[in-house]
Image: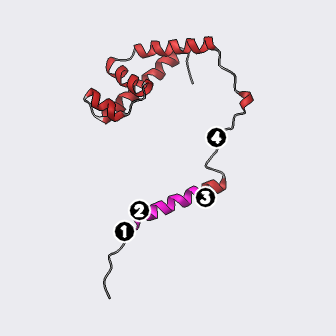
Amino acid sequence: MTATKPINSSPMMCFVSARRALESCCQAGIRNRRKKVSPLSVVPPNPAVQRDIRDRIEQAFTHLPAKLQVVARLALIEEQPYEEIAGALGISVGAVKSRVFRAVRLLRRKLKRMGVEP
């Protein structure tokens, strides 16, 4: 008899248990509890209102601190990956994520004060 190495089954067990949990949620109807919106209940956007909201967003963007504004513009508007932004600005990916988070938080506060809410 040859001795065999014990198999580290913890990653496999995690995968199996996660898969079973998902399957049981799906069977119970828990996974997709989002409200279903009828296409008829969606109001077509008003161009004047959209323009007003866009202007308010641009105004809120201009009030951000310069460091946050640059990162937010690259990440949120130009949709560049965090790694590219970090390389271009010479900062860490963590710093990019932190600045995006802070910028979004400030934008939400400012827009809420301006009467723009999602």
Element at badge 1?
loop
Q: Provide the residue designation for mark 2.
A: 11
- Which is nearer the N-term, disc 4 or disc 1? 1
Q: Residue furthest right?
A: 40
Amino acid, disc 4: Arg
Q: Which residues are magenta?
A: 9-24
Q: Is residue 62 left or right of residue 45?
A: left
Q: Is residue 7 above or below residue 26?
A: below
Residue under numbered circle 3: 24
- Number of residues whose C-alpha sits closer than 10 Å to that of mark 3, classed few (under 14), some (14–19) or many (20 or more): few
Sequence order check, earlier mark of 2 and 4: 2
Q: Residues within 10 Å of mark 2 (few under 14, many from 20)?
A: few
Colour mapping: secondary structure
| Frontmost residue, 114 versus 61 | 61
Amino acid type shown at disc 3? Ser
- N-term-proximal mark, 3 vs 2: 2
Q: Nearer the viewer, residue 102 or 80?
A: 80
Tell me if residue 82 comes above or below residue 54 in the rendering.
below
Q: Pick whichever of labels 1 and 3 is earlier in the sequence.
A: 1
Read off the residue under disc 4: 34
Vertical position of residue 86 compared to residue 44: above or below: below
| 21 versus 90 height, above or below | below
- The residue to which callout 1 is attached is 8
| Tags 1 and 3 touching, CB below 8 Å | no
Report the amino acid beneath label 1: Asn
Q: Dot 1 surroundings within 10 Å: few (below 14), some, or many (20 or more)?
A: few
Label 4 and label 3: CA atoms lie apart by 18 Å
> Element type at marker 2?
helix
| Contact flag, marks 2 and 1 (Cβ < 8 Å) | yes
Question: Quadrant location of the C terminus?
Answer: top right
Horizontal and vertical percent for residue 11?
41, 62
